[in-house]
Image (spheres, helix red, strand yellow):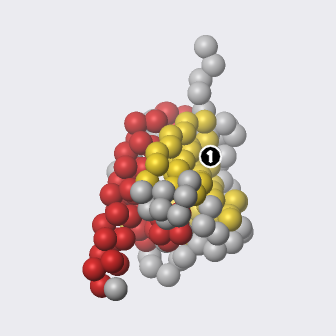
Amino acid sequence: MTEQRIISTEREIALPAAEIFKLIADPSRHPQFDGNDNLAHADQGQRIDRVGQSFTMELTSGKQRVNEIVEFEEGRVIAWKPAPVGEEAPGHLWRWELEPIDNVTTLVRHTYDWSQLTDESRFERARANTKEALDRSVIKLAELAETVDAGAEVTD
């Protein structure tokens, strides 16, 4: 049996894609919707806006990661490859895709792809990124987006 190395989940969220995208494009918000409880902190001011950009993240283990943006389409797609600081990316990728269904509903897809990972010492950790963990991330993102959106409506 071949091991599944591309894990994905999706969910409809009752918010416009632009509102959800604001959260995904801001790495400082990522720990708030991390379903693996692996992300501790990212500095503010690292808003993602192009391929080739990178952002840094501190893990709950205290380790630092540099994440290079490899796919970007404003309001639609962000994907990055994480790497330990000063090292080449070992070959795994995180992706968020947003597909507007209508003006107020968005299909959110979250993918973890470790099909290009060759460092076997990282396989066990890669396997810990399950569909259930991705589901938790999407659910947490939906809850955060709804809270942020609800707060925005109150202040308008």
Measuring from the top left, give residue 11's x and y in whole percent. Answer: 46, 45
The residue sitting at 71% across, 68% down in the picture is 52
The residue sitting at 43% across, 71% down in the picture is 28
Measuring from the top left, give residue 84's x and y in whole percent. Answer: 56, 58
The residue sitting at 57% across, 64% down in the picture is 66
Left or right, 76 with reference to 37: right
- Residue, far front: 102
Q: Is residue 96 visible?
A: no
User: In this figure, which residue is indicated by the disc labeled 1?
Assistant: 92
Left or right, 21 with reference to 132: right
Label 1 is placed on what type of residue? Answer: His
Q: Can residue 103 be seen in this view?
A: yes
Measuring from the top left, give residue 75's x and y in whole percent. Answer: 60, 67
Left or right, 42 with reference to 2: left
Q: Is mark 1 on a helix, strand or loop?
A: loop
Give the answer, above or below, for where 99 lies relative to 92.
below
Which of the image's four quarters has the N terminus? top right
Asked whether 27 or 86 is in front, the reply is 27
Sort mark 1 into few (<14), some (14-19) or many (20+) by Cα contacts within 10 Å.
many
Count numbered badges in the picture: 1
Give the answer, above or below, for where 50 lies relative to 132.
below
